[in-house]
Structure formats: structure tokens, C-alpha cells
Image (tube, rainbow, N blue to C red):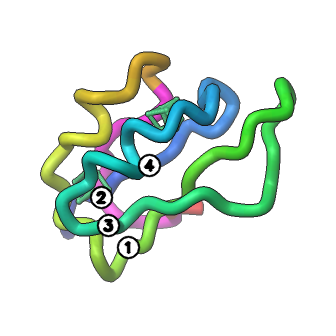
Amino acid sequence: MALKAKVLSQYCKSCGYCVNFCPKKALSFGKERNAIGAFFPVVDLEKCIGCGICATMCPDAALELREEVNNG
Ligand code: SF4
Ligand code: SF4
């Protein structure tokens, strides 16, 4: 099993840091909004290498690394 980024969408404020800093371009904003109206990113699991940069960059703790199971 590999570590993959998991978006905790309820915490996202749509700043875009994670999208911009992911070295694999594995994150992109989706079409859904969370409860505060922010678009949040979705993870392309094929591209994500589990480096954790996105989780480090996120100012709102909206990203973490998890073992890949159901990364919805
Ligand atoms: S863990 Fe690394 S490769 Fe995966 S989405 Fe985050 S920054 Fe991109
Ligand atoms: S860095 Fe965090 S708050 Fe900013 S867009 Fe990514 S998940 Fe959302």
C-alpha cells in the first residue's frame, strides 16, 4: 500500500497552495464546493507519489497522507 494525499475538504479555503506546489501536478480544483463555499482540490491518485508537500503547505490542515484505500 502506498501513501497518498487525502483532501479533508471541509477545512479547505481554496487558497491553491497545494495545487501550485505539488511536484506531480496531482491536485486540481474540482467542481464541488464545501460548506463555506470554497472549491477544494481533488487528488489524482495515479499521479500522487505521497511526498507530503501538499500537506506541509496547506495553511488549513486540509490535507493529510493516508494509506490508499478509499480516497474519495
Ligand atoms: S503528496 Fe505530493 S504528489 Fe501527492 S498530491 Fe501531495 S504534493 Fe502532490
Ligand atoms: S492548500 Fe489547503 S486550503 Fe489551500 S487549496 Fe489546498 S487543501 Fe485547500
Q: Are marks 1 and 3 in contact (CB under 8 Å)?
A: no
Q: Which residue is mark 1?
A: 45
- Name the residue rendered at 19%, 43% in the picture: 52
Residue located beneath label 3 in the image: 25
**Disc 1 residue type (three-letter):** Leu
Alpha carbon distance from label 2 to label 4: 6 Å
64 in the magenta segment: yes
Dot placed on the residue nearer the N-terminal end, 2 or 1? 2
- What is the x, y in percent for residue 30? 67, 61
Image mark for residue 6: 4
Q: Secondary structure at mark 4?
A: strand
Spatial separation of the CA atoms under disc 1 and disc 3: 11 Å
Point 41% across, 51% down: residue: 19
Q: Which residues are magenta?
A: 62-70
Residue drawn at (79%, 37%), measured in percent from left and top?
A: 34
In 3D space, how far apart are the residues under numbered discs 2 and 3 (Cα atoms)?
13 Å
Crowding at mark 4 (Cα within 10 Å: few <14, some 14-19, many 20+): many
Closer to the chain start, of discs 1 and 3, is: 3
What secondary structure is found at the residue carrying circle 2? strand
